[in-house]
Amino acid sequence: MNTSSAERRLAYLVSEYPATSHTFILREVIGLRAKGFRIVTASINPDLRPAESVTGEERAERETTYVLKRHGLSGALKALSWTLWRHPRGLARGLKNAIKRAAVNPRLAHKHFFHLIEALMVGRWMNRQQTDHLHVHFATAGASIASLTRQVFPITLSMMVHGPDEFAHVDREYFSEKVAAADFVFCISHFARSQTQYHSSPAHWDKIDVVRLGIDPSVFKPSERSADNGFSILCVGRLTPAKGQHLLLDALARLRARHLSVRLHLVGNGPDRDSLQARCRELGLEDQVEFHGALNHDQVRTMYARADAFVLPSFAEGIPVVLMEAMATGLPCISTRITGIPELIKDGETGFTTAASDVDELVERLEQLINDPALREQLGRAGRQQVCESYNLARNVDILAERFQTRLAGLP
């Protein structure tokens, strides 16, 4: 496929779009459209958030996004009959691959056949949209569907790898096959690229590029903060074991024992909410911890403006966009020395990183920030500069657009 500037048509496939945790994909799509790309979007699952919690931009995307699961059995049967008529050999290839995967793990056989049906639905939708390149974020279920779509239909495929979830079950999820099926692969960090290379053949390494995510520093910018209500810590992220929020509660209890006044604001929902609330009661922290639930893009910006520090004590991450946002607002940030985070936060220069699971070090860093306003200002200023230089949305969308053009122009 030789793609000229007038023919830059892409189809994006996402597990759920738009979504609170995937705002960066929305920003990317809008940015590429501003560069002249025609992008259509498909979502495997519907966005079930109530209308009042959705921003105007998200509402506009919901109205134009093709949602596979909303078309159900009728959509599946139409896609199957259309593929039998238009691409019978491709269907045979896809069926053969699904059977092969099912044979390896019969317990998960149904999953592969569902993915094949969804791939047929994606292929038929792309044909109606007159789009022949498919781009998928995350090398998980969406990439499984996308790689089958690539096998059945005469399309090209690219993939954005984030980590670390994509690397957790590489054999069961056929990660190396997904890399092989893709015409090119973007990774959000050098860490993600290293793991993609580790789990794929060197024959495919030349099609792997690092393309960073980014945020808009003109939207996420410093604001005047009030010290009237004591020191306020913000943590934004799903309430899951991977985010390590339980460590924050232990750290808060230790700070209280040192007679330091601290409040913690947890933004997000997830399976750990009940256990986190139970731990708050156990430690007597109910009056110091506030659970805000999931908030939209605009509401989270307000939370940044009210905080004195941002902490994300994760056990597993890619490079969290919320860290970029918090740094851009001038908040001093603390996270962990894992995966791609040290590419964003230079310890002691643009923020603090601690050893994952080390509550002692987390408490030490928090106490430094509480007692030293000048240090908070210094780290906040340096963190914002780091984001503006290396994680600027406009600049990184420019890079992404150029990589898309170069890679697409090089395809047959």
Image (cartoon, rainbow, N blue to C red):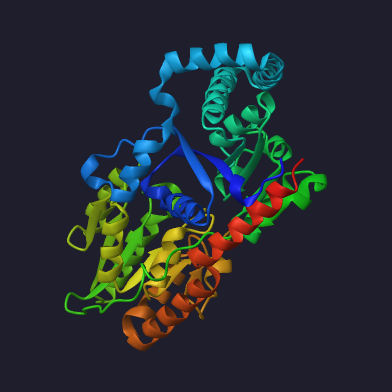
Relative to residue 125, is residue 323 depicted above or below?
below
Residue displayed at 56% across by 42% down: 10
Q: Is residue 121 above or below residue 196?
A: above
Q: Nearer the viewer, residue 51 or 165?
A: 51
Q: Position of residue 267 (x, y in %)?
A: 30, 55
Q: Nearer the viewer, residue 254 or 338?
A: 338
Residue 297 in percent (x, y) is at 32, 55
Q: Position of residue 196 (x, y in %)?
A: 69, 49
- Name which quarter of the figure residue 299 lies in: bottom left
Which quadrant would the C terminus be assigned to in this image?
Answer: top right
Q: Residue at x 81, y 48 (%)?
A: 202
Q: Position of residue 20 (x, y in %)?
A: 36, 48
Q: Nearer the viewer, residue 22 or 163?
A: 22
The quarter of the picture where residue 182 lies is top right
Residue, far right: 203
Query: Is any part of residue 52 visible from this angle?
Result: yes
Rendered position, 104 above or below 299: above
Residue at image coords 58%, 67%: 343
In the picture provided, is 37 more to the left or to the right than 2? left
